[in-house]
Image: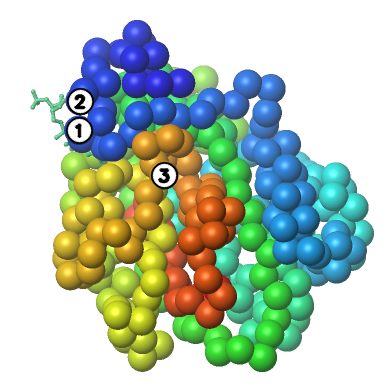
Amino acid sequence: MDNNDIAKLVETSDEWIRERTGVERRHIAGKETTVSMAVEAGRRALANAGTAPEEVDLILVSTISSNVLLPCAACEVQKELGAVKATGFDLGGAACSGFVFAYNTAMAFLASGVYRTVLVIGSETLSNITNWKDRGTCILFGDGAGAAVLKASEGQMYRPVTHSDGAKGAALTCESRYTKNWKEIPEENTYMKMDGQAVFKFAVRRVPEVIGEVLEANSVAPGDISCYILHQANRRIVEAVAKRLGEPVEKFPMNLQEYGNTSSASIPILLDELNQSGALKKGQKIVLAGFGAGLSWGASVLEW
Ligand code: UT7
C-alpha cells in the first residue's frame, strides 16, 4: 500500500508522509496472519542458520497484534516447524522495543546455560489495530515478520541496557477488546492511539542516551560499531539519533521507506535484508535499539 493509497482514506499526501516520516509504502497482510508470518520467518531463519527445528530449545515470539490469544503464536510456530523439543511463549506488549527485549531474554537464557538454541521472532499485523480514519497513525504502520537464531557460544556476552517509564504510557495506547465492559469502550480506543510529538521527543532523547549507556556498560567505543540497527519508526528519528551520537548516518541502515513501522518485526526484517545483501561481516559489532509503547526503550551490542 503506497502513500497515494493512504491519501484515498485520510486527508494527507505522499509528499507530507515522505517528508515527515520517510515512509513510501507499507505491506499489508491479506490472507497472512501474525502466526502464519511468524512461522514463515522462523522457517527461513532456521534454514538460513543451517539449524534443524529439532535443535531449537526455545521459541520466543514478540507481538502486540497476534490473531490468537491461545495457544500462543510461539506454540503454533513450534507445531508448524516441528520444533518438537522447544518450549514456546510470546512476549506481548513490549511493542516497538519487543525484538530487543526478546533478544535480551534469549541471551539471558543462553548466558545462564538454560537453553543452547533460541529462535527469536517479531511478527505483527498492525493493520488490524490501526485506525484507518486517523491520519496521525495510519500513515506510519505496516505488517511483517522477521526472525533470528541465537546459539550459545564461548564468545563475549554483552550486557544489554533497557528501561521502562510507565508514567508516560498514555503517549501510545491500545485498549483490549477482551474485557467485560467492551461495549462501553469507544471503538477508536481499541486501535493504536498516539501522541506523535511526545513519542518523537521521547525517541530522539532516549535512544541516543541508551545507546551511550550500552556502549559504556560494555566498554565499546562508537568507532568499534559497524552499524546501528534501530527500530524503523521514522527517518527523522533515525537521523536525529545519528546526529546526537555524532556518528555518520550511513552507519544507520533504514528500510522504513518500504515497510513503514512494523513494531517488533522492524529490526529482524532489517537485519535479514542486511545479511542477505552481504553487508554484515563476521565479527562486526552491531547495536540494536528499540523504543516505543510503555514507554519502553533499550539497546544491545552483538557480534555478528
Ligand atoms: O514505534 C514508535 C512509535 N511511533 C513513533 O515513533 C512515531 C513518532 N512520531 C512521529 O513520527 C511524528 O510525530 C508523526 C509522523 C506522527 C507526526 O509528525 P509531526 O512532524 O510530529 O507532525 P505534527 O503532529 O506536529 O503535525 C504537524 C501538522 C499539523 O497541522 P497544523 O496543526 O500544523 O496545522 C497536523 O494536523 O501536520 C498535520 N498532520 C498531517 N498533515 C498531513 C498530522 N498528520 C498529518 C498527515 N498528513 N498524515
For residue 16, the mark is 2
Q: Is mark 3 within 8 Å of ligand 1?
A: no
Whether the residues at callouts 2 and 1 have beta carbons within 8 Å, the answer is yes
User: Whole-percent x and y of residue 221?
Assistant: 31, 85
| In front of the other: 270 or 237 | 270
User: Whole-percent x and y of residue 115?
Assistant: 76, 77
Does residue 153 appear to the left or right of 75 in the view shown?
left
- The quadrant of the picture showing ligand 1 is top left
User: Whole-percent x and y of residue 39?
Assistant: 74, 44
Q: Return the disc, 2 or 3, that comes first in the chain's sequence.
A: 2
SS for dot 3 = loop
Q: Residues within 10 Å of mark 3 (few under 14, many from 20)?
A: some
For residue 255, the mark is 3
Residue type, mark 2 in image: Trp
The quarter of the rendered structure image containing the C terminus is bottom right
Does residue 73 appear to the left or right of 161 in the view shown?
right
Quarter of the image holding residue 291? bottom left
At x 28%, y 45%, the residue is 235
Q: Which residue is mark 1?
A: 19
For residue 196, the mark is none
Does residue 130 appear to the left or right of 181 in the view shown?
left
Q: Is residue 279 above or below residue 141?
A: below
Q: Say how the picture is coloured.
A: rainbow
Residue at mark 2 to residue at mark 1: CA–CA distance: 5 Å
Label 2 or label 3, whichever lies nearer to me, is 3
Q: Residues within 10 Å of mark 1 (few under 14, many from 20)?
A: few
Residue type, mark 3 in image: Asn
